Amino acid sequence: MSSRETYESLNIEPKPIRPHILAAATVVFGDDYYAGRRETINLSGFVQLNKWPMPGFTHKVDDEGYAQFGLELISAPEVGIKGYSYELDDRIQVLSNPFLPNSGHVRQIVPGKNFPAEFYIRRFGILESSTMRLAHRNVIDINGVVDNVPPFKKPLTGPYLGTPRGDGPFEVVPAPNVAGGTTLPEAWYPADDDNQPVGLTPSVFFAPSAGPCMSMLVDPTMIMQVSLEGAIDVEVGGRTVTIDLAGDYKQAAGIEILLFGPEKHGDGPGIQAQISRIAVTGHSHELGGRVMLRASWPKVSGGTLGEGTEDSLSRVKFPGELHVDTEFELVTPSGVLYAANPVHVSGRLNGMEATGTELRMGGADAPLVTTEDEVRARLTGVRLAMRDAHVGEHAAVNV
């Protein structure tokens, strides 16, 4: 190498990075890590990273030639990630602890070569639901390998190198530009007004499993958070039953759709679409009680909006066709069932406000299988109508 790179050559702007973040955590509920109820929860939200060359952050090259610069995940009322928990039947959100430093760095892996680089954050979090506020005692180290600054994940690509099925426990291999917790499991305890953990009896654990504090930054053109109501048809025990479902986006349920214009995905004209989260719940006697339809975390639910020739989102003619090959999972009291093949859902968006659009399943049925590939049911129909919606460039946690 004729010249040694440092991050000063990138001309990084002295301002915060404020991207959308997709995340997941495998959570064990209760005070016994080994006997608790385990669930992988899809999360998303709004994050702010302050970093060099903003005031208070440094860039340095050490004696061995490794360049690095400092960064920090800030705390603010609108900053955090949120999702819907089947086990709690409640919204949860993860925030940065404002009383502790959530700091880290980007550092060269090979001295004198900016990328690939190590991304590292010392994470101190707060976990909230409608009934609890929790903190953890130890730091959660978040590590990943990134190939750019900002380290945006390419649209419609998955978090792992491979697509495991299930909520674990098993090992996962993160893809580039994906970070994950490495100091897990971690116990979360009730917190006092100063966000200090209280007592010796935890309420929740984060587990090193299907979603071990995984996260990736994405850069959508527009984010749609929408309440849903409707029904699915499921063939179970030799008969077809209809299950009414609903989810409110204000409870981090419903659906989140990300739209990427050509300037974001770099694959030519057309608008790419991704269902990043879905959570709608109902009751089925045949499946044992309360059920929840959700989107897979390892497998991406990707598709398109419009005619495929648009050079920007503003060029979409409405009503516009929305098509997504969706990776559904059905959570039941006896375990999670996984659609063995993508389910094609489509609808006609009347405009960016989304309200009134109905998503319907088309094409082949999908067997619903266990992690051992045992067929327990079949998904034969999906009808989900969009209701209240919040559409914008950011999805703040307090929306």
Image: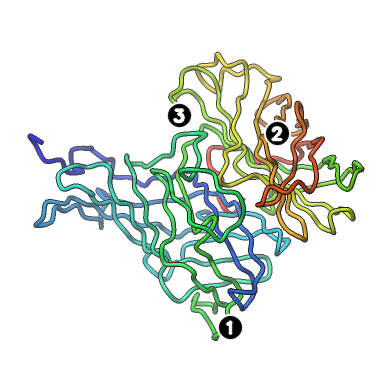
Rendered location of residue 49, percent (x, y): 38, 51
Compare marks 3 and 2 and give the one earlier in the sequence.
3
Q: Nearer the viewer, mark 1 or mark 2?
A: 2
Secondary structure under the numbered disc 2 in the rendered image: strand
Amino acid type, residue under disc 2 in the picture: Val
Disc 2: which residue: 343
Q: Residue at x 55, y 45 (%)?
A: 298
Q: Residue at x 60, y 49 (%)?
A: 165
Q: Badge 1, how many Cα within 10 Å: few under 14, some, many 20+?
A: some
In the image: residue 102, left or right of residue 210: left
Q: Is residue 131 above or below residue 359?
A: below
Contact between labelled residues 2 and 1, with CB atoms less than 8 Å apart: no
Label number found at residue 229: none
Amino acid type, residue under disc 1 in the picture: Thr
In the image: residue 139, left or right of residue 130: left
Disc 3: which residue: 264
Gap in angstroms between the C-alphas marked 1 and 2: 42 Å
In the image: residue 70, left or right of residue 129: left
Gap in angstroms between the C-alphas marked 1 and 3: 46 Å
Q: Badge 2, how many Cα within 10 Å: few under 14, some, many 20+?
A: many
Disc 1: which residue: 201
Q: Residue at x 78, y 48 (%)?
A: 376
Compare marks 1 and 3 and give the one earlier in the sequence.
1
Amino acid type, residue under disc 3 in the picture: Lys
Q: Is residue 147 above or below residue 305?
A: below
Q: Badge 3, how many Cα within 10 Å: few under 14, some, many 20+?
A: some
